[in-house]
Image: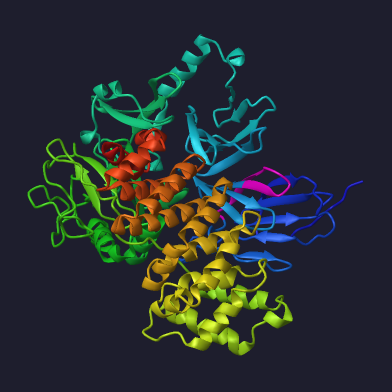
Amino acid sequence: MCTITKGRSRNFVSCVCIIPSSDMYPHGLIATGGNDHNICIFSLESPAPLYILKGHKNTGEYNALSIIEIIHLTGLYYSSFHTGHEDCVRGLAILSETEFLSCANDASIRRWQITGECLEVYYGHTNYIYSISVFPNCKDFVTTAEDRSLRIWKHGECAQTIRLPAQSIWCCCVLDNGDIVVGASDGIIRVFTESEDRTASTEEIKAFEKELSQATIDSKTGDLGDINAEQLPGREHLNEPGTREGQTRLIRDGEKVEAYQWSVSEGRWIKIGDVVGSSGANQQTSGKVLYEGKEFDYVFSIDVNEGGPSYKLPYNISDDPWLTAYNFLQKNDLNPMFLDQVAKFIIDNTKGQMLGLGNTSFSDPFTGGGRYVPGSSSGSSNTLPAADPFTGGGRYVPGSANMGTTMAGVDPFTGNSAYRSAASKTVNIYFPKKEAVTFDQANPTQILGKLKELNGTAPEEKKLTEDDLILLEKILSLICNSSSEKPTAQQLQILWKAINWPEDIVFPALDILRLSIKHPNVNDNFCNEKEGAQFSSHLISLLNPKGKPANQLLALRTFCNCFVGQAGQKLMMSQRESLMSHAIELKSGSNKNIHIALATLTLNYSVCFHKDHNIEGKAQCLSVISTVLEVVQDLEATFRLLVALGTLISDDLNAVQLAKSLGVDSQIKKYASVSEPAKVSECCRLILNLL
């Protein structure tokens, strides 16, 4: 007997998987991915999908909060943290009865709850991802793609990249023993294993490496960045060991450019092919550049360390340079105040293509070579003073005019850069941090839409009237539009009523609070001596480890934003012991957004303690940093903890001794070798110098 479940899709279905049975769905569920960018979740009881996890077309429109639209029969919050896929969904893999993974042509991997919340987004591949498979531990996974690679993901990070001598790696499957089977466009099936007993013979491995070394790599795939053969080092560059598994290094051998990959287990560089289309080529002559599964006229590589590009700026000549610059700043957590400078950089470096001029060289705004100099029409500025494209000067340290200068790091809070040369000392742009770090992103339309929807499910005594909703809409509007108008007492009363909704529906109200608390009047109203204790107590109650992750996250972000006001900062200092003891209980979860918020809260406390040298407060922060470093996996959270640590110990020998007694110096040494993002290793080394 065949049971047929029909689900309507606007395009073809490309992948299907079965979600195991659970108490809620005893017959299990069916998940499908399609060329309409959507993922549909079906039950056997109904032909209509229970959930549609909607993707979106890459139209160039920027959504300030990157909201994913989720259609659910009973209504569900629009996730404020991740979007759906932007292209055809190619593969699905089950983690548990409540979570699954997806991969797509947009070069991303996403972890979902079956109810529609996108929990994580992983990037590593540079082209279409065709297949995904999960290890027996139901946590780690593997992916294959059009970029010639099999990638192994552990703890949410790409732990290993294995190149194959074929362009398209169509499919993969993890066996029960942990071996990985891969099928590719060259018609060969290969099996990779960690078991020495099942490892291929020495002759077979040598034959594989020879075949790999004879492959050709098209520089236009975007996998290797922009390549200028004349500026590449020679074979002697391979004498230096790599810093991580799968690190790629390009060298010049006569007229050829060769690509090598570092193997940690073997301690050597393995040739993965010859690069074609690189010698003297630029983006004007080599055609479209593929980046994260999409074609661009330009993909500027922004080098921040010797190991390779840390930031990439993709651009099509039909795009709005201002919008592209805005997206670039947001994606890389750089300050929006640099919008004008980045947009001008794009305009200056693409005007050859736009106007049909002959000069196609482009200048890198972060490295010493080909610096962008405001007011100059040329991309070359070797004879001019080194000017920082974000500040106009002062951040670049003069000392070398060639490309041999190595970038020290990029400040994610200001966007300013510093580099070091043989004749210059490393400039510390990371700490001590002087101002609080806040969470400012928002999409008022989505927040209000969900607030109104959930208002219908609120208890009668807590429901908001139409007038109440209008008042909340006004306060959100004036906050997001930086209006000079002040929120009224009535508006703040309604906001307080909304944030006291039941825990399962309160999150949109908390989102409004998170944004509003930065306004001086709102900050004073909720954080003053009379109301502050009740306000903080209510938010602390939402940090219960058994509570809703969305509430935990938004409460932490609200606390972080409290620091911008005098009343809020005073309240945070008075509630420090209670707040930090509750916040640290969230360290054990797997939500990286919560880890980043927890790290930011610690950083903001560190900023305050650096100013008043409160050794007791510093001791608690150091203890929190030491504890969280043991469990955190996300490098952005790690970086913010490092900045907090550096801020605490700057100009304070007592704090240095406290940090040493906690063993923090040995804890952070492993981060000194992190190559990307470079800010982590650079900040770590600066701290180790103090310790």
- Measuring from the top left, give residue 629's x and y in whole percent: 46, 42
Q: Nearer the viewer, residue 93 or 690?
A: 690
Q: Nearer the viewer, residue 266 or 254?
A: 266
Residue shown at the point (69%, 54%) measured from the top left: 114
* Colouring style: rainbow
In this view, 194 is above or below 158: above
> Which residue is the extreme one toward the right?
1
Residue shown at the point (51%, 72%) measured from the top left: 513
In this view, 245 is above or below 373: above
Residue shown at the point (36%, 37%) measured from the top left: 660
- Measuring from the top left, give residue 217's x and y in whole percent: 39, 33
Q: Is residue 255 left or right of residue 123?
A: left
In this view, 494 is above or below 171: below
Q: Quadrant of residue 176?
A: top right
Residue shown at the point (66%, 51%) measured from the top left: 33
Task: Check if residue 90 falls in the magenta segment.
Answer: yes
- Measuring from the top left, give residue 4's x and y in whole percent: 84, 53
In this view, 549 is above or below 399: below
> Which residue is the extreme one toward the left?
383
Q: Quadrant of residue 198?
A: top right
- Measuring from the top left, give residue 268's x and y in whole percent: 38, 20
Q: Nearer the viewer, residue 321 or 685?
A: 685
Can residue 559 be seen in the rendering of this structure? yes
Q: Nearer the viewer, residue 36 or 49?
A: 49
> Which residue is the extreme one toward the front?
616
Q: What span is colored magenta in the figure?
A: 85-101
Image quadrant in which the C terminus is located: top left
Task: Check if residue 258 falls in the magenta segment.
Answer: no
Q: Is residue 356 left or right of residue 535?
A: left
